[in-house]
Amino acid sequence: MLTRCAVLGSPIAHSLSPVIHRAAYRHLGLDWEYTAHEVDEASLAGFVAGLGPEWRGLSLTMPLKRVALDVATTASDVAQTVGAANTLVRRADGGWDADNTDVPGVVATLREAGAPVGAPVCLWGGGATAASVLAALAFLESGPVHVHVRSSARAASALAVAAALGHPAEPAPWAVLPACADAGVTVSTAPSGALDPLVPALVVGAAPVAGRVLFDVVYDPWPTPVAAAWRAAGGVVAGGLDLLAHQAAGQLRLMTGADVPADLLRSAALAAIGARA
């Protein structure tokens, strides 16, 4: 029986997950299938309920990461704490285990970039990805975090994650503040283009960025204006492609039981982006 996995989300046509996971299957010598399916929040439960025993795992992207917990039989501690899952793995009894590999993916990405331990953090955005970043920062024992959002209510769920983990974080307005200049790490979870008007103040006006780390979760188009300006000013830059590779490595470990080098997955994604261009 053919073993099947897939990525679900809406929209899904842009997803690089099929390219990444298929490259991993080739590396591991697995004759598995990995496909992409357009699934929204209202149809997730029905889609999952209709899957046969040949299905092994599901990758979940927006807007399904929160509702994924509703269809899961069990959830890992990290998925429960963050209130979101990006992975469902089939149980022996036919149920589904929910997990979140975004959090360890953020940890791996920041470590790879050389993010300083204990440094203050400037975080932009307050959605589900920001919640995963805050959980990762707690694990990394970063310094205090100020979370820039357009509405403090929007950041409530993300800030609740930091509070649950005992990590200092507070909301901040959608503007560059003096505290931004003190941040050893700046993270943007904002949608593509949202941070563009603030680039001159953030990169040039706030403080020299040489030696400081920027992590922008966007991977296409890349580089983003803030990433390009940060790198040109001598700063260290990590991108969404790095996170995509590391979180996918975690998913593959859960689904196949094997480790796949993140560099292999990153290279596959880069090749696919190049082919699209």
Image (cartoon, helix red, strand yellow):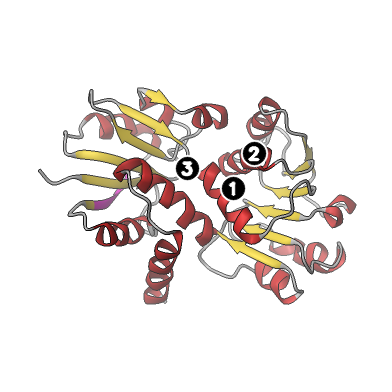
The answer to whether the residues at label 2 and label 1 have Cβ atoms under 8 Å apart is yes
**Residue occupied by mark 3:** 101
Q: In the image, 69: left or right of 212?
A: left
Q: CA distance from mark 3 to mark 2?
A: 14 Å
The quarter holding residue 131 reads: top right
Q: Nearer the viewer, mark 3 or mark 2?
A: 2
Quick one: quadrant of the N terminus? top left
- Report the disc number at residue 107: 1
Say what amino acid the circle numbered 3 marks. Thr
Front residue of this view, candidates 101 and 202: 101
Q: Could you tell me which residue is drawn at 29 percent across and 61 percent down?
A: 27
Percent x, y of residue 166: 72, 28
* Residue 175, above or below 159: below
Kindly report the distance in space between the C-alpha atoms of the residues bearing marks 2 and 1: 8 Å
Residue 253 falls in image quadrant: top left
Q: CA distance from mark 3 to mark 1?
A: 10 Å
The verdict on residue 35 being magenta is: yes
Which mark is first along the chain, 1 or 3?
3
42 vs 80, left or right, is left
Quadrant including the C terminus: bottom left
Please report the bounds of the magenta region as a residue range. Answer: 34-39
- Disc 2 marks a residue whose amino acid type is Phe
Neighbourhood count class around disc 3 (C-alpha, 10 Å): few under 14, some 14–19, many 20 upward: many
Q: Which residue is mark 2?
A: 139
Residue 260 placement (x, y as % from top left): 38, 55
